[in-house]
Image: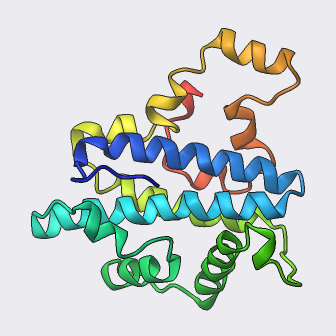
Amino acid sequence: MTLPEEISLDKRMEYLGIADFDYLSARLLLLSGFATTGFPLAAQAIEKLLKLFMLLYEKITNNRELTKGDIKKYSHNLMKLFKYLKKRVPANFDSTWQDYLKTLQESYFRRYPEDWKLHSYEVEVNRLDQTFSYLRNKIIANFPKEERSRTRQFGTFIYDAYSEEIQKIIKRNGGIPPKDIFYLKNNSANDFDIDFSHL
């Protein structure tokens, strides 16, 4: 994710919306069997949430706004970001969390042919849904109370562009609107702390 020189918490809603749409894109690709592109996108969605958690946590706990350099040292390393989360969230993360995030991280670095080697992915979208819903719920709980209702709207500002007319055009062109992608075989849909009325 590209960040400005000085990271402003004013952009927190935008980061959440972009993570939501990375997640939807990853879901659609994985459900369609496109693991080589779906897993890296899933990795980016989870990375954005973990970095957003870090930004919010540092501001709330230490009254510190992180800089681009603070975030950049984590690069795309989901394991380092997960380690940061585990130290600060009172939850027991079983080994499947680490295994899944490691798979996502490896997929991100296998995007180019020179890095390919024999590897198999279990194209299981349920794990992505569970991971994303858990992290998203934790993150929106750290947003200021006055922003809570907006953060509960999936896609935040990005979804605002999907008017009824735009969704009709998407369907007419053979596409799937965001709401339908979210619900498509999503066993974790009810686990999300989301206001579905705008979808």
Q: Nearer the viewer, residue 47 or 95?
A: 47
Residue 129 shows in the view: no
Vertical placement of 110 versus 157: above or below? below
The spot of residue 67 in percent (x, y) is: 22, 61
Residue 142 shows in the view: yes
User: In screen coordinates, is 93 left or right of 51?
Assistant: right
The spot of residue 176 in percent (x, y) is: 79, 30
Total numbered badges shown on the rendered structure:
0
User: In screen coordinates, is 185 left or right of 163?
Assistant: right
Q: Which of 48 and 67 is in front in this view?
A: 67
Q: Which of 140 and 118 is in front in this view?
A: 118
* Residue found at the far bottom of this picture: 95
User: In screen coordinates, is 26 left or right of 9?
Assistant: right
Vertical placement of 16 versus 39: above or below? above
The spot of residue 54 in percent (x, y) is: 31, 67
Scheme of colours in the image: rainbow
* Residue found at the far top of this picture: 165
Look at 12% across and 64% down and name the residue there. 64
Q: Quadrant of residue 55?
A: bottom left
* Residue found at the far left of this picture: 63
Look at 58% across and 85% down and name the residue there. 98
Look at 60% across and 21% down and name the residue there. 162
Q: Quadrant of the C terminus?
A: top right
Vertical placement of 196 versus 83: above or below? above
Q: Quadrant of residue 34?
A: bottom right
The spot of residue 124 in percent (x, y) is: 80, 67
Look at 73% across and 73% down and name the residue there. 110
Q: Quadrant of residue 109?
A: bottom right
Vertical placement of 56 versus 84: above or below? above
* Residue found at the far front of this picture: 114
